[in-house]
Image: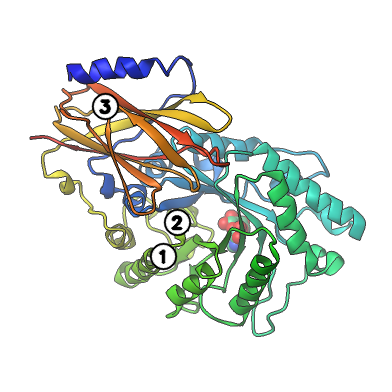
Amino acid sequence: MRGHVRKALVLGAATVLAGTGVVAIAGTANAASTLGGAAAGKGRYFGTAVAANHLGEAAYASTLNTEFNSVTPENEMKWDALEGTRNSFTFGSADQIVSHAQGRGMKVRGHTLVWHSQLPGWVGGLAATDLRSAMNNHITKVMQHYQGKIHSWDVVNEAFQDGSSGARRSSPFQDKLGNGFIEEAFRTARAADSGAKLCYNDYNTDGVNAKSNAVYNMVKDFKQRGVPIDCVGFQSHFNSASPVPADYQQNLQRFADLGVDVQITELDIEGSGSTQAAAYSNVVRACLAVTRCTGITVWGVTDKYSWRSSGTPLLFDGNYNKKPAYDAVLSALGGTSGGGGGGGTGATCSVSYAKTDTWSDRYNGRVTVTAGSSAISSWSVNVTLTSPQKISSTWNGSPTWDSSGNVMTMKPNGNGNLSAGASTSFGFTVMTNGSPAAPAIGPCTASAS
Ligand code: XIL
């Protein structure tokens, strides 16, 4: 204990900046007892779509903050929300979600830059030359506003038709600019923010079929010609008419084999009980089986605010109770529910994170671990980086890394005793390698002897 305080003072030398956004992160008894914590243990994120107008609801915010370590604004970053009038940008609601997430060490997915839907009328009225400059201006202004804050952007959403044609969907962009609009959007996006991963996102592409084949061929062509693309998003909206395909994992894998990450971006599965739970479990297991499947986002926190509310497709019911689907997801992620996983000691801890210094190529972070209402004898905290970031040094803790090199598990350097309510800190330097993203700080696991 004393030794830790002394070391924390050494660390203090690097923490000269006051008020750099220190934030408390809800702690839980076990790192693997939440969706985000368990996913982080597998080197992945577990996110949800979030609506800014629900953040003030206590149960919504606490479920979000406890369970998830990534967010996607459900509507707030769409073209109609951000640029309803040409070149006049309204970032307020989207900024609210981004700052909520950033203050809690959560990642943010940007959704979406170029899409035929939720597109203001003025865009469709432009002739080709004007439309091209409006598209590029929209991408550039939005991405620059959020530079350094977005883990992955859905650059183009839903550009292909359903069914067997494999053709592009009609839209102002397709109809006036032709197939090349997708490539142009990705090139503009890379120039606007080279630190964000650039994704193509679509639905009904979850299994091997004509539509996913068409997307696959586009991605393959982009990779061959050096058009910048880093990831493909699979929306994964399922119900009994459109169930989880049997070849879901195989389809994710064939895209990953093209040299892109794959992400499950809008997962929801209509149904209830064990049927729904089993389908969710299949999706999670498929992602875990594909090395480049880097994270899963469900399309909402609670059934009551789902865009398909009547199908009760999410993990928490309308009263924020965990559904069987929740337990299935947690267990598929290798987590354990109920708080019994910490050895049954009742030991808890919480963490807060602060960025303490920034240089052009790196930054320092500090995590403070605080014991809960009883003394603890040891603790463990996961720190998850955004590739290609690397940690170059740490202090006041004993780190180990997972095989991906993205997840550091920090434990006490020697004696981990903390009396009830007492704190200690550890620190680390993140080499950004082009990505200034904040690390995701997993929940704190405590044990008591
Ligand atoms: C949905 C939102 O959930 C609704 O609130 C909104 O009214 C319509 O859009 N594919 C997408 C998402 O990429 O943006 C859509 O989100 C769902 C389908």
Q: Where is residue 331 in the image (x, y as percent from the top left)?
A: 27, 60
Q: Residue at x 41, y 63 (%)?
A: 291
> Which residue has dot 2 on it?
295
**Mark 2 neighbour class, 10 Å CA radius: few under 14, some 14 to 19, many 20 or more:** many
Q: Return the residue found at the far bottom.
A: 164
Indicate the secondary structure of the residue bearing disc 3: strand
Q: Which residue is drawn at 69% across and 50% down?
A: 190
- Report the image quarter containing ligand 1: bottom right
Looking at the rendered image, the quarter that the C terminus falls into is top left
Which amino acid does the dot numbered 2 rest on?
Gly
Q: Is residue 415 above or below residue 336?
A: above
> Which residue has dot 1 on it?
287
Which amino acid does the dot numbered 1 rest on?
Cys
Sooner in the amino-acid sequence: mark 3 or mark 2: 2
> Which residue has dot 3 on it?
370
Q: Residue at x 13, y 31 (%)?
A: 377
Query: Is the C-beta separation of discs 2 and 1 under 8 Å?
Result: yes
